[in-house]
Image (tube, rainbow, N blue to C red):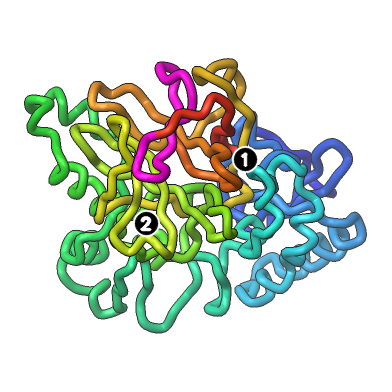
Amino acid sequence: MTQCWQPGTDYGNGSVVEYQGSHYRVIQPHRSQGDWTPDRTPALWGRVADNECGQQQHHHHQQQGGYQPQQQQYQQQPPQQQQYQQQPPQQQQGYGYGQQNQQGYGSIPAVVPENSDDPRKQKKDGFDIGGFHVSDDQLKIGGGILGTAAAVGIGAFAWDKYNDAKEDKAETAWGASNWEQDARRRQGEYLEAIKNNRPLPPVTWILTDGNNIPQGAIRGGQESDGTPLYIARAYYDKGVHIGKISKDMKEGARIAYGGKEVIVPKYEILLGYENAVKWVDGEGHLKNTQGLKLVEGGRESDGRPLYIAQAHIKNSVQPAKVAEHLDGAFVPYGGDEKKEKHYRYLVYA
């Protein structure tokens, strides 16, 4: 008999649950939380038909006590197109271009074949991440994966060390070098998860440069000609500010700061599962966000958080930054920092 979904439960490969009369199969192993119900987390759960659920249970009982081949686990996953048809419309759309998403991250299982678009895909000779190639030999030397990450200088930055750094030293000393050190550490953890085929978080920041856009980057907008724009952030003037990057921006990402559109050669790009996030309408100061978990993008120099947004400008959709202390979305565009009253901001689905 299928178990009912419960919060605070560890769900691994092959888990099938019942929730509000429907059956779901786990996509990404995880420990459930109260607001991670199967119907609202398509990155974690895939809905299955009742007859398919029965076949899955029969197969599961036959496999108990023995090894279940990884390839069989992959074949049992629902088709990607079926996943998209079952998702709520608001999770697919971001000012009209969401329907063009062809990567389907939410439908990729924990074991990923080499021909997949998922950043966790297995490759015979290392990984291509953030414009760098890390070979299997590199992964085995130089202090392991963490040592390799530091050696090649790639990474993803998280603000969990921000306050600690300010306590340990003067704020003026907390600069770009510290940001990059944290980035390398985070990148090492990300590589470790890929190499050992462990579950990845819904979104991850990856350090890169120029117009090197890693596979799996989350789309944040598009130019008027349809060119995709991805979400970027970079350290600048004692803060980390949100901006954009595309394949046409060879010099690097563009961030909005101090009334200008600033070019930054080295930056981070948001990577992850597009099904794990959604866009919510906003206006003016960021407010009325109760019950929503916003995707944090950066910080002002004084530590105030900045969040990811997108706004319409001249037949385009541009990535932007919003905050409680800002009276609109601030967009890097046309050499300037433009303010838009109406926008959408990014939250976890």
Give the distance between the C-alpha atoms of the residues marked 2 and 1, in whole angstroms.
23 Å
**At 53% from the left edge and 19% from the top edge, which residue is drawn?**
284
Residue 134 screen position, x and y as percent: 29, 73
**At 47% from the left edge and 53% from the top edge, which residue is drawn?**
230
Is residue 259 magenta-colored?
no
Residue 66 screen position, x and y as percent: 64, 72
Residue 24, label in figure: none
Count neighbours of disc 1 (C-alpha within 10 A) and say few if under 14, some if 14 to 19, many if 20 or more: many
The C terminus: image quadrant: top right
Q: How many marks?
A: 2
Residue nearest the viewer, comparing 33 with 276 = 276
* Residue positioned most to the bottom: 124
Q: Is residue 17 left or right of residue 239?
A: right
| SS for dot 2 | helix
Residue nearest the viewer, comparing 73 with 323 = 323
Q: Start and end of the magenta stretch?
A: 321-337
Count neighbours of disc 2 (C-alpha within 10 A) and say few if under 14, some if 14 to 19, many if 20 or more: many
Q: Quadrant of residue 257?
A: top left
Instruction: Evaluate whether residue 9 shows in this view.
Output: no
Q: Is residue 213 above or below residue 201?
A: below
* Residue to which mark 1 is pinned: 278
Q: Is residue 173 above or below residue 229?
A: above
